[in-house]
Amino acid sequence: MTELTGKIEKRDVGIGVWALAATDGQVYELRNLPSDCQQPDTEVKVTGRVLEDAMSIAMIGTIFEVESCSSLQ
C-alpha cells in the first residue's frame, strides 16, 4: 500500500475527474474515490496503489486506485 497526502481537485475533463494534488508535487488521477472525500479543496490522506499499467482519457497524471481516504481538516 502507498499513502499520499494532498488536496482534492475536480478536473473538468469529459464528465469530470477527481484528482489529488499531492504534497510530493505530483498530480494523481483518483479511481474509486469514496463519496465522502469528493470535496474539492479538501486536504486528505489516501491509501491505495499506483496503477502502472493503466491509462485514461483524462491524462492528467498517474492513476491511483484508492483503498481508503480520510480528511485532514
Image (spheres, grey):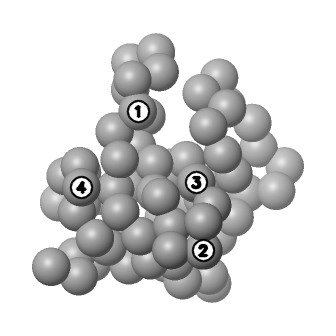
Q: Residues within 10 Å of mark 4 (few under 14, many from 20)?
A: few
Q: How far apart are the two marked residues, 4 and 2, measured between alpha carbons?
A: 17 Å
Q: Residues within 10 Å of mark 2 (few under 14, many from 20)?
A: few
Mark 4 and mark 2 in contact? Answer it, CB < 8 Å: no
Q: How far apart are the two marked residues, 1 and 2, measured between alpha carbons?
A: 19 Å
Expressed as whole percent of the image width and height from the top left, the position of residue 31 reads 50, 49
Of labels 4 and 2, earlier in sequence is: 2
Q: Is residue 32 visible?
A: no
Task: Quadrant for the N terminus, please.
Answer: bottom right
Q: Which residue is mark 4?
A: 41
Q: Regarding mark 3 in the picture, which secondary structure is present there?
A: strand
The answer to which quarter of the image holds residue 69 is bottom left
53 vs 17, left or right, is right
Mark 3 and mark 2 in contact? Answer it, CB < 8 Å: no
Q: How far apart are the two marked residues, 4 and 3, measured between alpha carbons?
A: 14 Å
- Residue at 82% from the left image edge and 56% from the top image edge: 52
Check the image and report above or below for 5 versus 66.
below
Q: Which amino acid type is shown beneath numbered disc 2?
A: Asp
Q: Residues within 10 Å of mark 3 (few under 14, many from 20)?
A: many
Residue 27: image tag: 3
Mark 3 and mark 1 in contact? Answer it, CB < 8 Å: no
Q: Regarding mark 4 in the picture, which secondary structure is present there?
A: loop
Mark 4 and mark 3 in contact? Answer it, CB < 8 Å: no
- Residue at 41% from the left image edge and 70% from the top image edge: 6
Q: Which residue is mark 1?
A: 11
Q: Which amino acid type is shown beneath numbered disc 4?
A: Asp
The answer to which quarter of the image holds residue 59 is top right
Expressed as whole percent of the image width and height from the top left, the position of residue 20 reads 46, 57
